[in-house]
Amino acid sequence: MGVGLVLILITSLIFPGIVSVVKAKVAARKGPRVMQHFYDIIKLMKKGNVYSRTTGFLFQLAPIIYFSTLLTAVFFIPVGNYKALFSFEGDFVMFAYLMASGRFIMIIAAMDTGSGFEGMGANREAFYSLLAEPVFFIIMGSIALHTGHNSFYDIFSSLYVESALTYFVSALSIYLIFWLSMIENSRLPVDDPNTHLELTMVHEVMVLDHSGFELGLIQLAGGLKFAIFGSLIFNLVLPIQNNYFVQLAFFPIVQIIYAVLVAFVESFRARNKMMRNAQWIITLSALSIVVFLTILIIHEKVGMLP
Amino acid sequence: MKLFLETYNNSDSVNLADIPVLSYKYFANMLRSYFVDSDNHCLSYYAFRKDDKLKFICAIAKDSDGKIYLSSHELKAGITALDSLTPEFPQLHIFEREIAENFGITFEGHPWAKPVRYSENRADKIKVMNNYPFYEMMSDQLHEVGVGPIHAGVIEPGHFRFICNGEKVLHLEIHLGYQHRGIENLMLQNDNPIKLCVLSESTGGDTAVGNALAHSQLMESLADFEAPEDLQIERCIALELERIAIHIGDTAALCTDVGYQLGQVVCEALRTTIINTTQFWCGNRFGKGLVRPFGTNYPLNDRTVEEIKKILNDSGKRYFDMAERIYSLPSVLGRFDEIGIVTTEQAYRIGAVGMAARTCSIPRDIRSTHPFQYFKNHRPQVVIQEKGDVLARGMLRYLEAKESVKYIFELLSKWEYTEKSNLKPDYNYKLKPDRFSASIVEAWRGELCHFAVTDEKGNIMHYKISDPSMHNWFALALAVRDQEISDFPICNKSFDLSYCGYDL
């Protein structure tokens, strides 16, 4: 049980480092050490905090709540054979709303600063996550329908690789979860983590006023998000029937491929125009509906439709 | 009655007394007859104190015949109000604001007579940057966003005040002056010609060659000197190298702003090779010290020519390949196309110059319309774009760089057969007394004007610099109207206007 959790936590520390190293290599730059991201967080954690006079207690509380909701969300994620800490019927709904409540508190904290920039960022973050939420639910709902189970562990453990439908569902779900993770982590094409221009930022501008320990927590949480989505992808890639050693060996490989993919996406394309983000996210929802309808039709559950 | 004095760019200076002095009414009529034709635009309109009077000089450039028309009017001491000409000719708005700020003249009817740069010698010392009343819209539905004066990328300081409806920009007010150093006054206080040259180079760090060339040309025309052919060619090559380097650097910056890493890193690297070539030539990457009046310390030699040819062939080709890729990549086009449009009509009305004009299908290029230096003998092709959006401004950079590379090769082949004069810079020049001279250079941004007036002893009495950004900042304000606020950074970058050139 604990092994999966440890794997996810280790991934969360290393993942951002791999992305930045690969990005640097693609750009023919030397790049930072893989662990640099981790050292930066330690450095931040040692620093004191600076608070704007316009902010209240909520602003100081938000990063801690944000981090703890994400950490709790991690407890819901199984890794292959390793069962999650919490597992019950419909746990993925709980998982999704834990993530959402973390984001909610960060949005409130950004509004608390009273800065024009952060207000805009909060507005955008709320809008995009609102649009992205259906994608996750439609995918998870479809897979639940396909397998007949409704907790993470049961869903993934009964996802048979043998049928063509499972291949199709898994492939499309991996694709969608990949882009979903890019939205959740405020990466390209929705947001650009490297930009210095406040007017174009989404997530970055919301955390502009945070400093020291709390900024460290926010960055840790960023790594956790990647690890969470990485584990979801891993569960879809590798059937749970494999033995423990194959699982253990494949987990880092899948994570590294995922990180390299993120870096490549960020290197070879430009980000979306802000207004087109909404359209783009809705396209993802449309794709997830394709998964849903396919499963409905193949399982002849069309009668369920109203 | 003579309404104006005709002169050519980079020709002899003119007698100050020969510039006709009109009454304000005639002056306005004269402008009316000129600006009715879109072929003409105002180079600069400024004032200076002469004896007890305030002398206003207006220089108008006519694109079709390459002439510059000079006209003036005077104001007796004590009179502090004039009718504003801005409502009729919007392109004068910035110049009237500048005169109003420096001399306390009220232009009645000026729509928004805000100070230009809060210069140290402004007439009204009570007006300071911090108590400036920004344009406001009283509505509960709208919100204001203030950006700067510290730029997020720590480039140059400027404050931008947006009035937005959600993500949509309704109005942008640009507030500059944070970099004011009093260059024009420093030009008068210094009598060391080397210092003057260095000062003009430092007016804008990205236009070092352009400014040094404009200054050198000005001094040479006031001293009745014409540069020999090889010196002219070398200056043109330096100017074009600067153009290529900045255009490549700006392409990189445009890619950065839309998060396209590949375009960014490739163009950044290529820009370095170009400015390193300038360093190889004169020891400074930005070409400081390369252009000097009456001669040069760094004449071209075979090794430098070899290096320039090698780098331009190699980096030039790579940049063109990269640019082709950038401007055909769907995700980049999605960010550039139809963003920040300035219409041709708007560009004419605000008197846009240089790149900003050429992206709105206005063929305003001093190298071709009012040629200077070697451009007189051999004019480069003027590159035009039509749409006036960010993509047009990006494409213009690519095409101009391409044209400049071609042009440098042509110049280099001409240079081989010119007689080498080996002139060293001469700082003991004597300027002719009571003269006025205009020197206009097409720097990479657009027409850069340096004007000087000498007194009866041949000392510089007044020095005026007009950066192309003076005309073009307003184009940015127009471009972002009705756009998303998140597109402001790429609009700003696509113009890449000068803060320090404007602040002086």
Image (cartoon, rainbow, N blue to C red):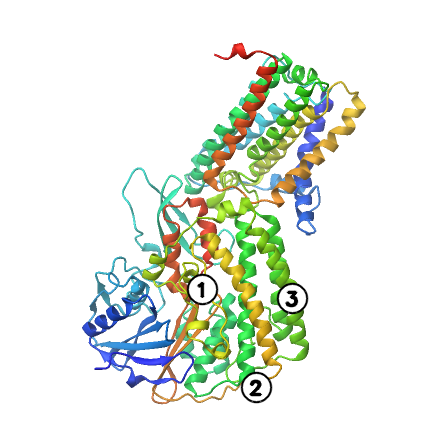
In the image: residue A11, left or right of residue B482: right
Disc with the residue nearer the chain's start (3 vs 1): 3
Q: 10 Å neighbourhood of mark 3: few (<14), some, or many (≥20)?
A: some
> Quadrant of the rendered structure where residue B484 is?
top left
Q: In terms of sequence position, does the residue under pointer 1 or pointer 2 come before the other?
A: 2
Q: Amino acid at mark 2?
A: Lys
Is circle 1 on the same chain as circle 2? yes
Q: Residue furthest top?
A: A303
Residue A91 makes an appearance in the image: no
Pick the quarter of the image with the C terminus of chain B.
bottom left
Circle 1: residue type: Cys
Relative height, residue B433 to residue A26 (above, below) = below
In front of the other: label 2 or label 3? 3
Foreground residue among A53 and A282: A282
Q: Earlier in the sequence, mark 2 or mark 3?
A: 3
Tags 3 and 1 touching, CB below 8 Å: no
**Marking on residue B313:** 3
Judge the density around disc 2: few (<14), some (14-19), many (≥20) Cα neighbours within 10 Å.
Answer: some
Nearer the viewer's eye, disc 1 or disc 2? 2
Left or right side of B323 for B112: left
Instruction: Estimate the x, y position of residue B123 in percent, counting from the top left.
Output: 29, 68
Q: Amino acid at mark 3?
A: Asn
Q: Quadrant of the N terminus of chain B?
A: bottom left
- The label shown at residue B500 is 1
Residue under the image location 78 percent in, 20 percent down: A242
Chain ID of residue with mark 2: B
Q: CA distance from mark 2 to mark 3?
A: 30 Å
Q: Which residue is mark 2?
A: B424
